[in-house]
Image (cartoon, rainbow, N blue to C red):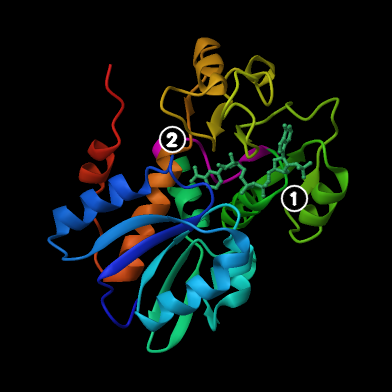
């Protein structure tokens, strides 16, 4: 937990104008009666280190998103075991003059799977993509008894490198990857700004669940297609809220009002 209660919180990324974090973190601060602000800062990669230096001098805490999670990991003085294992930081705070990095994407994914109601122990997870979000999926599932992960994607070298880090993760056979899958996860940006599907959910077993890590104002094409085919599905908004709730706990030592956070980003109509 943050040693000093932060008065200012920021989201570091680029672009960040689309981010929902200021809305739901603002609602969490208000509900908790905490006198602090949360704002998105669009930071170009070459500005990151000077910006972090200034934030540290002012005791600022916050979140990190694309493309800075690795660079902030490298810039932190101290890392939690989860941030170290992930090789990425999405949550930071100051402890005196030390910058501390954590990773709540892993716990956020785990909590979103709970919300979806998908089985964890013995799960057979197909994860499409092999970047930072896929690494969070691999880390979260490592604590599920007997769970296995198959990586599906277009980048064999990245999939092999990720699978080599975890005994329960393998690179899928492209001809059969969907067989016996209990949960299929989209960990690519496919469907974020277009109507393409990262995979056809109708291929999954009838009781296979779908989680899209992408979120957008309307439902994602994958979630719509999965529900049309009779499968349970949620998009990345749940994981986003859950990683944000865990970050709030790190900063302030209290569980935030998740209902207030959810209401702040609720879809209407
Ligand atoms: P990343 O590290 O850049 O990895 C992206 C992965 O997707 C890579 O494996 C990449 O393959 C693959 N990919 C990219 N474009 C593709 C395409 N057109 N077709 C097939 N594969 C493609 O990004 P990330 O941090 O893992 O994020 C992935 C997605 O998850 C993003 O949409 C992000 O917004 C979302 N996300 C959501 C949350 C949440 O809280 N909901 C948290 C983290 C991430 P190559 O290596 O071949 O490029």
Ranked by sequence position, the earlier of labels 2 and 1 is: 2
The quarter of the picture showing ligand 1:
top right
Residue 117 got which mark?
A: 2
- Image quarter of residue 2: bottom left
The residue at the point 81 percent across, 38 percent down is 172
Specify start and end residues of the magenta stretch as a single range: 114-127
Q: Is residue 161 above or below residue 267?
A: below
Residue 257 visible from this viewpoint: no
Image coordinates of residue 91 in percent, x first then y, are: 45, 64
Depicted 22 relative to depicted 211: above or below: below
Q: Secondary structure at mark 2?
A: loop
Direction top: furthest residue: 228
Which class describes the residues within 10 Å of circle 2: few (<14), some (14-19), or many (20+)?
few
Q: Is residue 169 left or right of residue 22?
A: right
Rendered residue at 61%/35% (across/down): 185
* Residue carrying label 1: 169
């Amino acid at each position: 937990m943050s040693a000093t209660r932060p008065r200012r919180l920021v989201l570091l990324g680029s672009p960040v104008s689309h981010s929902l974090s200021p809305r739901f973190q603002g609602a969490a601060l208000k509900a908790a009666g905490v006198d602090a602000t949360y704002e998105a800062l669009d930071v170009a990669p070459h500005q990151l280190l000077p910006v972090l230096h200034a934030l540290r001098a002012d005791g600022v805490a916050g979140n990190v998103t694309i493309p800075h999670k690795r660079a902030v990991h490298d810039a932190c003085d101290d890392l939690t075991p989860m941030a170290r294992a992930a090789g990425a930081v999405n949550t930071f705070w100051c402890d005196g003059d030390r910058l501390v990095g954590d990773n709540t994407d892993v716990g956020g994914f785990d909590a979103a799977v709970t919300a979806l109601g998908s089985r964890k122990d013995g799960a057979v997870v197909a994860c499409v993509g092999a970047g930072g979000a896929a690494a969070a999926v691999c880390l979260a599932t490592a604590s599920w008894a007997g769970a296995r992960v198959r990586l599906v994607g277009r980048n064999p070298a990245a999939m092999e490198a990720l699978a080599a880090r975890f005994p329960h993760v393998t690179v899928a056979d492209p001809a059969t990857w969907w067989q016996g899958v209990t949960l299929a996860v989209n960990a690519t940006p496919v469907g974020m700004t277009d109507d393409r599907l990262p995979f056809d959910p109708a291929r999954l077993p009838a009781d296979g669940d779908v989680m899209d890590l992408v979120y957008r104002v309307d439902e994602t094409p994958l979630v719509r297609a999965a529900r049309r085919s009779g499968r349970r599905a949620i998009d990345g908004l749940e994981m986003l809220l859950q990683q944000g709730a865990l970050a709030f706990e790190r900063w302030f030592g209290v569980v935030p009002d998740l209902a207030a956070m959810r209401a702040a980003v609720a879809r209407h109509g």
